[in-house]
Amino acid sequence: MLSDDEPVLVAVVTFLYLEGSGCLEIRDHEEYPRWVVDCNEPGEVDQYCVMAQGSIGGFACPDGDCLPAPVQSETWGAIKSLYR
């Protein structure tokens, strides 16, 4: 994590899509809700928020709970290059 306002990847899930649609919802652990523990000794606990739920097959999923939503300034050329 480079700074406090940058996203951190905490998990990767791979699926074999056959058909249908739905949401992948990120839920809290019962004993350790929203905890991310760093590698320091002793480990320091950080809290996280959910930027977005996962959508399968174009299903309309609920928004995450990070407020306000992070926005990064980009040039029009950089945005167009994402869709080439």
Image: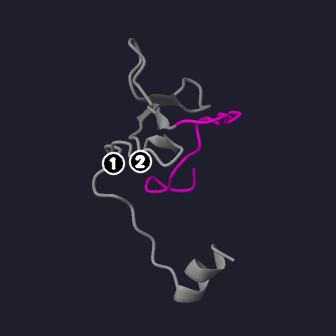
Taking depth in this image into account, of 50 and 46 the one nearest to the observer is: 50
Front-most of 39 and 75?
75
For the residues labelled 1 and 2, say whether their Cβ atoms are less than 8 Å apart. yes
Task: Please determine whether, in this image, residue 25 is positioned above or below residue 29.
Answer: below
Q: Which residues are magenta?
A: 1-20
Residue visible at 67% across and 36% down in the picture: 17
Q: Please state if 9 lies on the left or on the right of 31 as rendered.
A: right
- Measuring 40% from the left and 29% from the top, which residue is drawn there? 34
The percent coordinates of residue 58 (x first, y second) are 49, 49
Residue 58 vs residue 15, the one in the foreground:
58
Residue at left 39%, top 12%?
31
Amino acid found under the numbered disc labelled 2: Met
- Residue 5 seen: yes
Which element carries disc 1, helix, strand or loop? loop
Verify whether residue 8 appears in magenta: yes
Residue 63, percent across and down? 33, 46
Seen at 33% across and 42% down, the residue is 62
Query: What colouring style does the render use?
Result: one colour
- In the image, which disc is placed on residue 66? 1
78 inside magenta stretch: no
The prevailing secondary structure element of the residues shown in magenta is loop
Q: Which amino acid, by three-letter code, is at mark 1?
A: Cys
| Residue 5 position in % (x across, y down) | 43, 56
Residue 4: give x, y in percent of width and height.
45, 52
Residue 44 in view: no
Quadrant showing the C terminus? bottom right
Residue, far top: 31
Task: Decide: is 20 above or below 42.
Answer: below
The residue that label 2 is drawn on is: 51
